Image (cartoon, rainbow, N blue to C red):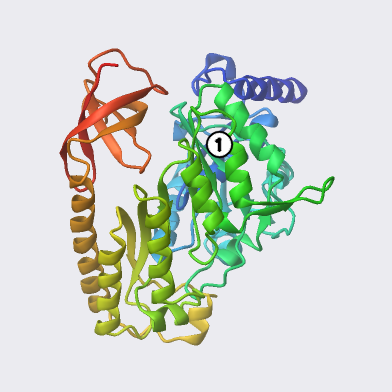
Amino acid sequence: MHHSTREHGNELLDDIRQGEAFDYQSDTLIGTRKFYLESYGCQMNFSDSEIVASILVEQGMAPTKVLEDAHLIFLNTCSIREKAEETVRKRLKEFRGLKKNNPDLLIGVLGCMAERLKDKFLVEEQLVDIVVGPDAYRDLPNLIQTVDEGSKAVNVFLSREETYADIAPMRLDSNGVTAFISIMRGCDNMCSFCVVPFTRGRERSRNAFTILAEAQNLFDKGFREVTLLGQNVDSYKWENPETRQMISFAKLLEWVAQIHPDLRIRFSTSHPKDITTEVLLTMAKYDNICKYIHLPCQSGNSRILNLMNRTYDREWYLDKIDEIYQILPDCAISSDMIAGFCSETEEEHQDTLSLMQYAKYSMSYMFFYSERPGTLAAKKYKDDVPESIKKKRLNEIIQLQHKLSLQHNEQDLNKSFRILVEGKSKKSDAQWKGRNSQNKVIVFTPLTEVNPGDYVNVTVTRVNSATLIGQHLIP
């Protein structure tokens, strides 16, 4: 029986790789062990879940969206903020409740919380059976077997080589139009507020040819947009072992753009210190590389940036913004902002607000500082800004970004954009949605038949701070 389900799993994986529709509730999967995956945090976590799904399907298991049907439940976790840990703990307690009716249920924690909370989740609180770090997903079949044999299982080993380059991700919850491609793992930037170098390890870049093959494969299956993912994509570098040629991010970007003019390329995230003029010129050269850069600043004040170990100051960042707009006048830039970092004064907070106005961000991810155990800031600096002030400053950042986003969108009124159709709008079946090159969502009413994956021209007739509303132009 085990042998036949393993073979069945391989057939399933082949179907997925060939792009055939995959029904989570397929009757053919009765008797097959089912897994339920829930992901939190950054896009990289969601991308990792697709790798995990592929590994499990290879073992003859099948994904399910119905929690109660699952034999294995995995939570892919994020350690960026304290709230995420509270959410995961609450969710694990809910899962543990399901064990009353299903004592054979296996519960696991994957990803960034694995190393730090392994003892707490496994031993002290006994919430989980299995803990697996971001570089140990290949070991999942062995770890599951260990649990089946009656023991708890842990692997949080961080690798200097693992990139999962040979594993074809299983596209979970896919719209069939857009997909993520992980191009590198880990991070070498020791930003003082950040846990990522400790939870995901050192930077390593994936073989460029496997990235190109994955992008080509997605295009052949009908996908029309790929997002190249990494904690810091601009520091991508891979040496071709045959030619000794060093492939930079700019070169990789160009190669992916050359696959087909109808394949759109996005990328995330960029560290300001690493985004090169060559990358900007490559973006300008190819229409299918989207004119959108997520360029997290974190603070607008040089002293705070130094405490954060961001390795640039305010003036340097503003010069980079100038260069982007000079080479790519129609580029949209977004950011991350942290309010109330250690010892931040009111005057320094005002520097953040003035930098946001200068950069004219189209959108931002905005948070107040949350100290993470094990980070450089937790060891070196006192978290001394009262929470009430953090929240007040964050609210001012949010209000300003709301205004900037509205101004940014108002500039698009009466303009026409080439939109990649992603599917029906959430609010109405009569409306469709897609994104333009600047990563802005456009909701529109089609005048002729459209399908996901189509490119259509849409004129913007109304805007709000989050969305453009438009009219489909008949070709």
Hey, which quadrant is residue 343 in on the image? bottom left
Q: As displayed, is residue 400 above or below residue 138?
A: below
Q: Position of residue 274 (x, y in %)?
A: 55, 63
Name the residue nearer the viewer: 442 or 395: 442
Find disc 1 in the rendering and name its residue: 257
- Mark 1, Cα crowd under 10 Å, few <14 / some 14-19 / many 20+, is many
Name the residue nearer the viewer: 59 or 332: 332
Q: As displayed, is residue 304 above or below residue 189?
A: below
Residue displayed at 63% across by 29% down: 61
Classify residue 287 as left or right of residue 252. Answer: left
Q: Quadrant of the C terminus?
A: top left
Classify residue 23 as left or right of residue 346. Answer: right
Residue displayed at 49% across by 52% down: 280
Q: Position of residue 437 (x, y in %)?
A: 38, 39
Hey, which quadrant is residue 112 in on the image? bottom right
Residue kind at label 1, given as amino acid type: Ala
Residue furthest toward the right?
Answer: 242
Residue displayed at 50% across by 62% down: 271
Tag 1 secondary structure: helix
Residue furthest toward the left?
Answer: 462
Q: Quadrant of the N terminus?
A: top right
